[in-house]
Image (cartoon, rainbow, N blue to C red):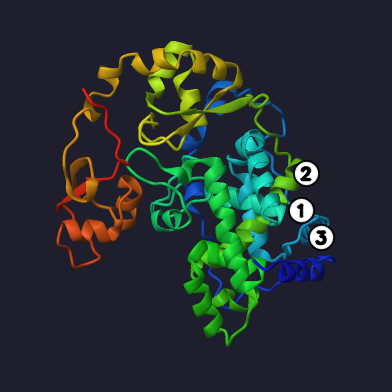
Amino acid sequence: MKKKGYLLFISSLLAISVNVCPQTAESDTAMYVPDVWEVSLDSLLQVWHIQHLNQKMEHPAYQQATEMSDSVYIDRLSRLNNIIPMHFDEDVRRYINMYVNGTKIPYILGIENRYFPIIEQTLDANGLPEELKYLAIVESALNPAAVSRMGASGLWQFMYGTGKLYGLEINSLIDERRDPILSTQAACRYMKSLYGIYHDWLLVLAAYNSGPGTVNKAIRRAGGQNNYWKIQAYLPKETRAYVPLFIAATYVMNYYAYHQIYPVDTGDPIPTDTVMVSQAIHFEQIAAVLNIDLSLIQSLNPQYKCDIVPGNTKPRPIRLPVLQVYAFVEKETEIANYKKDELFAKYATTVSLPNGSKEKIIHKVVKGDTFRKLESKYGVSMAQIKKWNNLKSNTLVIGRKLTIYLDNGGFSVAK
């Protein structure tokens, strides 16, 4: 992003106004609802802080969300100190209602203090509008372990290819799309690159959702218009809903109290710190030796897919409660040796396979499988899967057995 262009953009938006935008002619009657808002609360409730600290505040009006008039919504949106313009239309109203009448916002409000400070600091360091933090609510409901039906993962719902492109490590043991810090840094780099293309934050949001190719096509179909609301009708249904979803999330996270929404009380954030390890460590070793809840370690380190920190391939961080960090340093050798043979048994044999991989598996294609899902699940690319199985088509056949060679970053534990 060019600094001069960014400053000019900011200066042009100093007096932010809220515009009432008519629905496009091609607007659908049925609402688009993202994956994360269709599924049950089960995944979100796996977050350690909610499992262990949930003290739901009871209130007689807890389930009585209150709707407002259009003029109230417009006035409230106009009062937000945002760079991104907060338009209002019927779609925004419908998504506000979806949020305030749903079950997730109280839980999101309860855990926002775990993730928003990280996101805000990273946005500020990159010169990006702070309100972009609400995009993580649209994407994942602030759940770093969220996985979409299409295989996108993490707070920012990176697909495999995009995550790799922006420097995130993804293999059998590690998925940095699920690391709140690293994925937020990658998301900021991605959004900065998109802003360098469009110089318009609403177009950046649309491109973040569907890719710049889709947005460029919509711009061409709209006669070269570089305005989100002018090209909205030419975008896919999901992307047409994306900006209204973002505006609605921004509204609700600022005005939830006016709708009788009460945050779930998850207690104060647990002070944590990181320590670098240079040997293979299993979460169960840490939990047993330091007497820490295993689910807490998993919650603090969601990027490690198999509860293993492969520090023997290169030094890697592990996040722990700050009071246990010193104990970890003192007892690291004891931790690394605790039930080592038992916990690492299936990783103990190194097999020579193509491309330096360490493990060969057979995946049987089932209904609903896509290349994107397999990419996300196994940390390999579509091109690799097709090459290993001599596939020409981009369509998977149910029942077919696929050979996949897992890249584990050179990880192995010798017997």
Lower position in the chain sequence, tag 3 or tag 1: 1
Left/right placement of residue 348 relative to residue 180 reads left
Three-letter amino acid code at disc 2? Tyr
Label 1 with label 2: CB-CB less than 8 Å: yes
Mark-to-mark CA distance, 2 and 3: 16 Å
Label 2 with label 3: CB-CB less than 8 Å: no
Category of crowding for the residue at label 3, using alpha-carbon neighbours closer than 10 angstroms: few (below 14), some (14–19), many (at least 20): some
Tag of residue 32: none
Three-letter amino acid code at disc 3? Ser
Residue 53: % across, % down: 59, 22
Write down the quadrant of residue 127 in the picture: bottom right
Residue 350: % across, % down: 19, 34
Tell me the quarter of the image containing the C terminus. Answer: top left
Tag of residue 258: 2
- Residue at the location (57% across, 57% down)? 189
Lower position in the chain sequence, tag 1 or tag 2: 1
Q: Does 384 appear above or below 260?
A: below
Mark-to-mark CA distance, 1 and 2: 9 Å
Tell me the quarter of the image containing the N terminus. Answer: bottom right
Q: Does 194 appear above or below 170?
A: below
- Please state which of the two labelled residues, at mark 1 or mark 2, is closer to the viewer: 2
Three-letter amino acid code at disc 1? Met
- Front residue of 167/312: it is 312
Residue 209: % across, % down: 52, 62
The answer, for residue 149, to whether it is visible in the render is yes
- Label 1: which residue? 68
SS at mark 3? helix
- Please state which of the two labelled residues, at mark 2 or mark 3, is closer to the viewer: 3
Left/right placement of residue 178 relative to residue 399 reads right
- Label 3: which residue? 78
- Residue at the location (72% across, 30% down)? 60
Lower position in the chain sequence, tag 2 or tag 3: 3
